[in-house]
Image (tube, helix red, strand yellow):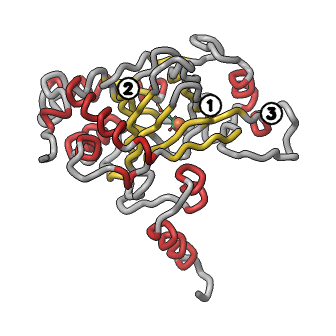
Amino acid sequence: MSAPTLTQLIDLDAYPLDAPDSDRYRDAVGAARSGLRSVGCAVVRNLVPEPAVRQLNDEITAAKSTTHYSTEVINPYFHTTVNPAYPDRHPVNTFIERSSGFIPGDSWTSGSAIDTLFRSPELGRFLAECLEVPHLHCYDDPLAGLTANILDPGQQFTWHFDTNEFAVTVLVQEADEGGLFQYAPNIRSADDEGFDAIQAVLEGGEVLDGELGVHALDLRPGDLQIFRGRYSLHRVTRVASTSQPRHAAIFAYTREAGVIGRVERTRQLFGRVLPAHEAAERERVRSDTLLD
Ligand SMILES: O=C(O)CCC(=O)C(=O)O
Ligand SMILES: [Fe+2]
């Protein structure tokens, strides 16, 4: 089967990503920029038309047996062990369940809808403009570049900060109950950890909308979300045990070309590493000033 075209994957009437000089394009970029500047989040509603959403969901469902599920009890910084330098009731020592899975990058075939959308130069240009950076490259990591986040019934992705500067997500299948994306915009900054506010959110329980500065997003299948997760604490709430699973495609981009993830983090998220990760790690060691 040949790869889908841009017209099939993106609603070009509403969002003419192929016509960057058009008014509609400028409006879409302007709206996303204002969301990203104010709350670090922008939602492009119905960017992906329904037939393409179905195709993405079929691809995710077909690859689902390759999902790496991991249940860990993590603090917002993805650590799993107590740090005695901090008190008990402190974000660093507050551990909550993360039980979800990722379908890794090497599960997709080239020419699939999900891979074609991720690599679309028009989408890359649009995202770079929204994020106000000169250029974006697809994250070159063979596992973490293009993933799907899977939350099966009963699972949750608890409060955390991302290590990436920003994330791009397309919701593909929503949960019937639960599975909501919630975030506390700019709860920390480069020079303020914001521990007290973070602790209040961690202790806030299941339902937080408009309280403690937490926003909930009403995402629908086909919506694209651009999110700065470095300073904004966020989670996906527990999917009800009677619900259908929640599927989200996650596109990772970097400002520099050829970036690849660290061995330890890769193992935590995917349960394995590839020769490319090992080689990159050796290169990192070699690029210091030691005598080989
Ligand atoms: O599935 C999502 O909407 C986002 C999950 C998330 O926060 C992450 O993968 O870091
Ligand atoms: Fe995240």
Q: Does label 1 or label 3 sit earlier along the sequence?
A: 3
Tell me which amino acid carries mark 2. Gln
At which x and y percent is residue 37?
A: 43, 28
Q: Residues within 10 Å of mark 3 (few under 14, many from 20)?
A: some
Q: Residue at x 54, y 70 (%)?
A: 281
Q: Nearer the viewer, mark 3 or mark 2?
A: 2
Disc 3 marks which residue? 90
As measured in the structure, the alpha-carbon distance from the residue carrying label 1 to the one carrying label 2 is: 19 Å
At which x and y percent is residue 133?
A: 35, 44
At which x and y percent is residue 142?
A: 40, 58
Tell me which amino acid carries mark 1. Thr
Disc 1 marks which residue? 158
Q: Is mark 2 within 8 Å of ligand 1?
A: no
Q: Residue at x 55, y 46 (%)?
A: 163
Tell me which amino acid carries mark 3. His
At which x and y percent is residue 145?
A: 40, 51
Is 247 above or below relative to 272? above
Q: Residue at x 48, y 73 (%)?
A: 279
Horizontal relation, residue 174 to residue 233: left or right: left
Task: Name the secondary structure under disc 1.
Answer: strand
Q: Does label 1 or label 2 sit earlier along the sequence?
A: 1
Q: Nearer the viewer, residue 38 or 245?
A: 245
Is 109 above or below relative to 291? above
Q: Nearer the viewer, residue 27 or 91?
A: 91
Query: Which of the 4 image quadrants contains residue 80?
Result: top right
Give residue 173's mark: 2
Residue found farthest to the top = 210
